[in-house]
Image (cartoon, rainbow, N blue to C red):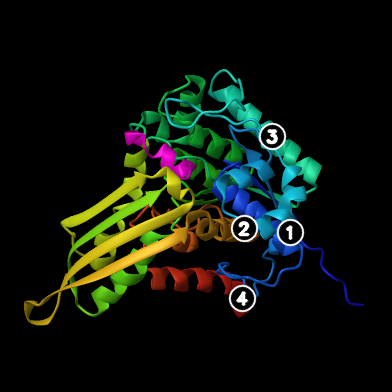
Amino acid sequence: MNVIAKRRKIGVAVIGMGGAVATTAAAGLEILRLGTNRMDGLPLAHLSVPRMVQYEDLYLRGWDLNAQSLADAAVEHRVLPADQMASVEPALSAIRPWAGVASAAYCRRIEGANMHTAAGHRAAIDAITDDLRRFRDEGDFDSVVMINLASTERTPQASDAWASPEAFERGLDADDAAIGPAMLYAYAAISAGVPYGNFTPSTAAEVPALVELAQRHGVPLAGKDGKTGQTLIKTVLAPAFKARALHVDGWFSTNILGNRDGEALQDPDSLKSKLGTKGSVLDSILGYPVEDHVVDIRYYRPRGDDKEAWDNIDVTGFLGQRMQIKVNFLCKDSVLAAPLVLEIARVLDLAQQRGEAGPQEQLSLFFKAPMTARGDAPEHAFPVQERMLHSWLMADTAA
């Protein structure tokens, strides 16, 4: 007698649930559950991978400093057209974010009243862990994954507390200021056995203490800083320039965007964290430093989620002849990011099923600053990253 395998049901606990990316991802899942056959933008939709959860079996909930319903938040973000908004409004109206953990010292531009009043690091972790436990139990999920979509935090000064799990525990007891909210969420996830993905440039699970802790607990990690727009284009074009021996003399990149992410980046310390992940890609791919690599990001409120990125690339070719390439990418930031969040959640869940722990290097395709298994320099070239992910995904089918 044929036995139909039970489909896995996965909860995705999102930090920054009221943001444009999270509301777009939640709306997308509802539209998929309503029966659409449009799978555009979902990079892994065409692959049949054993044990990987179906999109319709992902359920997003999570934390945000704004307590408004996801429907109200989605209207405010203006990503979805009216017809799509009407179809998902009933489902999104029923979802309100949980109270979040935050620190004005780490993210000065984002405020909200929907915040845990926990006193100290340990109390904050207890609150996050309680939310995860309640989410898993009430949703009757086979597993839970955590994804960080919060606004960019400033990068703290390196601390001895980051060196080992034991040092991190001492830092938690002392409420060490070098342990920010993103690290508290990551620690809570790892301690609860929940895979963790960092889609932001904030310092989180990549510190040695949390990497080692994840390996001890058998928890997969991925991050950091989702690769959606301008950096995606760089990691596609740069390998082609290298293959054709076109020397990149300079690359000028600028962005304008008007969503909450852009607002947070008005803080110079948060902006520095973002520029740090965007600026390291070219030299790694090309094999030499691009001395005139300029990256500029500006908050421009009228654009909302409609981001515009300009690139001017100066190259030298045969016989020392100079040439230029111009790229103008007009995109919806959240429409590019939301499907990647869903894919990261699916792959992290599959990694846990396969018994893997620590940094999941095969997810490099989706990040500007990928974590690596041995802590060595990451691969940035898009074609190589794509082959790496597909080889890992298809490992079960090749056996």
| Among numbered discs 2 and 3, the one appearing first in the sequence | 2
16 left or right of 144 in image? left
User: On the rendered image, what quadrant is the N terminus found in?
Assistant: bottom right
Image position, residue 197 (x, y; %): 53, 49
Marks 1,3: beta carbons within 8 A: no
Reading the image, the residue beneath label 3 is: 131
Disc assigned to residue 81: 2
Decide which of 282, 159 is in the foreground and name it: 282
Q: Is residue 219 visible?
A: no
Image position, residue 198 (x, y; %): 50, 47
Disc assigned to residue 46: 4
Reading the image, the residue beneath label 1 is: 57
User: On the rendered image, what quadrant is the C terminus found in?
Assistant: bottom right
Per the rendered image, the range of residues in magenta is 258-269
| Among numbered discs 1 and 3, the one appearing first in the sequence | 1
112 left or right of 192 in image? left
Task: Assess disc 3: are there few (<14), some (14-19) or many (≥20) residues with their C-alpha within 10 Å of its C-alpha.
Answer: some
